[in-house]
Structures are given as C-alpha cells and as structure tokens.
C-alpha cells in the first residue's frame, strides 16, 4: 500500500511520459511490496518554493506500512531516483516518510492489520 506523492513546480510537460510506471516499479522494488499495491501521484505545475526560492523544487511524501528500520537507506535511494528521473537537484526537495498502521488502511474492503 505504499503511496508515493510528488509535488513539484516542474511543468507537467517536463515530467517523463513513463514516470508513473518507473516510479511504481522503483517503489515496489525498493520497499519489497507488490506493484499492484503501489500508488503514485504527481502534482506538477505547483506554486511552491524551497528556501525562499521558486527554482525547480519538490516536496515528496511516502506513506507505507513499515517498521521504519530502512528509512535511511530508502532516503538515499529515493533521492537518487528523483534526481535522476526528474532532474530536480537533491538540495531542492524534502521527503516526508509516514509509517502507517495496517489497521488504518484498507484495500478491497479489508484492512492490512
């Protein structure tokens, strides 16, 4: 049930056409979760700034049912993925990791916990 959300001021037409598929496959592999449970959302053309500068930037959220033990490793790998695929410098975005409880998330009418 990972939910990967990218908010960016990058124009929609600059997002690679296959970014959703790339991100889904990457997050699935990175977290060891089945692709059919991964949600990817991109909110392009956002009015936003980082450090009082509206140069190319992003705010990223990753919500997942996890114990959080590998967040430091995921931070490095996701940062590299975003920088490589969207060309957003790693000093121009933050990633907010949220660990969810399985009982608070449902799919097909059943919770994960």
Image (tube, rainbow, N blue to C red):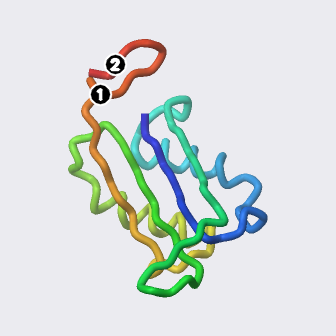
Q: Is residue 35 above or below residue 13?
A: above
Q: Quadrant of the N terminus?
A: top left
Query: Which of the two discs, 2 and 1, labels the residue nearer the N terminus?
Result: 1
Q: Where in the figure is residue 82, as x and y percent of width and height?
A: 54, 66
Q: Residue at x 36, y 63 (%)?
A: 75
Task: Please give left or right for residue 21 compared with residue 92 in the image.
Answer: right
Q: Residue at x 45, y 73 (%)?
A: 93
Task: Please give left or right for residue 50 compared with residue 83 in the image.
Answer: left
Q: Quadrant of the C terminus?
A: top left
Determine which residue is flagged by label 1: 104
Q: Where in the figure is residue 30, as x and y percent of width and height?
A: 43, 49
Q: Quadrant of the rendered structure where residue 104 is?
A: top left
Secondary structure of the residue carrying tag 1 is helix
Determine which residue is flagged by label 2: 111
Secondary structure of the residue carrying tag 2 is strand
Q: Residue furthest front?
A: 47
Report how far apart the C-alphas of labels 2 and 1 lie in the structure.
7 Å
Task: Please give left or right for residue 102 compared with residue 93 in the image.
Answer: left
Q: Where in the figure is residue 7, as x and y percent of width and height?
A: 54, 61
Q: Look at the numbered discs 2 and 1 and tell me whether their residues touch, using CB distance below 8 Å.
A: yes
Q: Residue furthest top?
A: 109
Q: Residue at x 28, y 38 (%)?
A: 100
Disc 1 packing (10 Å; few <14; some 14–19; many ≥20): few
Label ID, residue 21: none
Q: Residue at x 51, y 69 (%)?
A: 58
**How many numbered marks are there?**
2
Disc 2 packing (10 Å; few <14; some 14–19; many ≥20): few
Task: Please give left or right for residue 27 compared with residue 16 in the image.
Answer: left
Q: Where in the figure is residue 41, as x and y percent of width and height?
A: 57, 48
């Amino acid at each position: 049930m990972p939910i990967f959300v990218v908010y960016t001021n990058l124009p929609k037409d600059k997002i690679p056409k296959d970014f959703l598929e790339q991100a889904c496959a990457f997050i699935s592999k990175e977290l060891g979760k089945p692709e059919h449970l991964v949600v990817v959302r991109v909110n392009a053309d956002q009015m936003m700034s980082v450090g009082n500068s509206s140069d190319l930037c992003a705010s990223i959220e990753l919500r997942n049912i996890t114990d959080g033990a590998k967040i430091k490793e995921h931070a490095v790998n996701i940062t590299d993925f975003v920088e490589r695929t969207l060309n957003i410098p790693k000093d121009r975005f933050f990633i907010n990791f949220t660990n969810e409880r399985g009982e608070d998330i449902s799919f097909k009418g059943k919770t994960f916990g």
